[in-house]
Image (cartoon, rainbow, N blue to C red):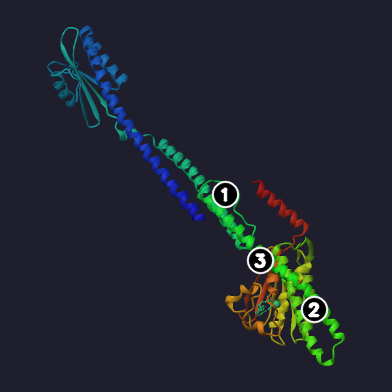
Amino acid sequence: MRTLFLKIFLWFWLAMVLVSGTLILSVVTTQSQFTASRAAQSDRTITPLVAARAADVLDDHGMGALSDFLASLDTTLHAQAYLFDDEGKEILSQPAPPEAEALAQTALQTDDTKVLITHGKKFVARRTIGSTGSRYVLVMGTAVESAADALRAPLETQFVRAAVVFLIAGLVCFWLARHITAPIRHIRAATHRLAAGHLGARVGGSAANRGDELADLSREFDHMAEQIEALISSQRRLIADISHELRSPLARLTVALGLTRLRANPESVSGLDRIELEAGRLDGLIGSLLRLARLESGSENIGHESFDLGALVRDVVADAEFEAQSLQRHVRLLRMDSCSTSGNRQLLASAIENVIRNAVGYTPEDTSVHVTVENGTGNNSGFAVVRVRDHGQGVPENSLGDIFLPFYRVGDSRDRSSGGSGLGLSITDRAVRLHGGTVTAENCPDGGLAVELRLPLDLKPTEKKERDLTTDGRVSR
Ligand SMILES: Nc1ncnc2c1ncn2[C@@H]1O[C@H](COP(=O)(O)OP(=O)(O)O)[C@@H](O)[C@H]1O
Ligand SMILES: [Mg+2]
């Protein structure tokens, strides 16, 4: 994404700099062509007048006055002027360049203004007749200004000009690249949120109101997200409704079972026990399904109660140890940092209990399940990490993410007598995510599964105040 922004930015910038460069160059050349044609025009009008005036000055006032007049042309027209008589001799005996002498000879034969441009100099010659009737030729030499000369402005000026063009082009391109990529950024963020399970994620806002193809894409995305949300919501509602509807017949079945027991003969007791056991399992399954449906619909209120996470884990471990002992297994709390989190204590207790119960179920006899509670550091800073590790077979690597899906069970777990319905870890996952945390599982190198629950730490009032202050600072900047 950032590279798309960079690509657009750099290409537009380059294009703009090239276009401005070409434009400046073409303006300069056209301008110098224009200057040249204007100079030719002024040569034709001014030279005859100056020539006539020079001849008159000589005839009426003599050589001294002519010398002054020719010198004055140097300051007014920046021209070196020479006056030749009709034999091609320079009147003031000034050393004239050979080109000027040659041009004077040519001009003597004609009434036209003659122009010669050589070696960066321009000579203009014109024949004229003085007040005494003598013929003269005036030749003026000036330096030629070429297109390249026009470009030869002082280096600093050129540098400042280029910098300004560069800067303005850069700013415009930066804005353009941002403008083009902004909706893509919004669509990407919405895709991320949707993929993370936030079904209400939409692009919306300015991205959808631009009136271009990206706005169409944003609207299409929002439409798709709406469809997905409607589909998943109706599916969840269906599961919740079915579970709910199953509760009443199950309750009636239990009552009928109780009544039948009262009149049962000894042979049917074992059958009734079995029915009661299965009814109990069914009740547990329906209870789990309803809890999962509530967690997924977001209707579960997690509250803001702050509590000691270490103490919570200690209680869950104590209960689990009591059960584990009867199975010749143990649950040990190896480390307990003091940390607190906030939310629904009961929900988190059952989430952690699900994980520990699994571990007790899968760890072999005479082994222990190890539990630690740590204040996270590094990547986990700001989180409390509860880690539950057993010494069982673990889970195949490619199923590590799937065990958090509803009804997912690895291999033959379904056939085991200890096996549940495959809802425990999905309930744990949803409950922890509702609290802003995450659950992950990994196989330990020396065997066994380690499940890690990350839960946001509840900051102490002073820390909270500091965090709010820094957040404010960031916003107001
Ligand atoms: N500690 C563990 N060791 C090995 N496999 C595990 C462990 N915990 C969970 N699993 C696997 O993940 C599956 C899903 O677990 P869970 O959602 O708790 O369902 P259930 O316990 O009802 O089978 C289990 O069926 C099992 O295959
Ligand atoms: Mg389980």
Q: Which residue is mark 1?
A: 208
Marks 2 and 1 in Cβ contact (< 8 Å): no
Quick one: label 1 or label 3, which is nearer the N terminus?
A: 1
Residue drawn at point x = 65 percent, y = 82 percent: 413
Q: Is mark 1 within 8 Å of ligand 1?
A: no
Picture layout, residue 300 above or below residue 470: below
Q: Which residue is mark 3?
A: 235
The residue lying toward the viewer, choosing from 282 and 87, is: 282
**Quadrant assignment for ligand 2:** bottom right
Q: What element does badge 1 sit on?
A: helix
Quick one: label 2 or label 1, which is nearer the N terminus?
A: 1
Q: What element does badge 2 sit on?
A: helix
Question: Residue 253 bears which disc, if any?
Answer: 2
Q: Give the image quarter of residue 412.
A: bottom right
Picture layout, residue 399 above or below residue 477: below
Q: Residues within 10 Å of mark 3 (few under 14, many from 20)?
A: few
Q: Give the image quarter of residue 344.
A: bottom right
The residue under label 2 is which amino acid type?
Leu
Quick one: label 3 or label 2, which is nearer the N terminus?
A: 3
Q: Is residue 102 visible?
A: yes
Q: What element does badge 3 sit on?
A: helix
Residue 369 pos. (x, y %):
71, 80
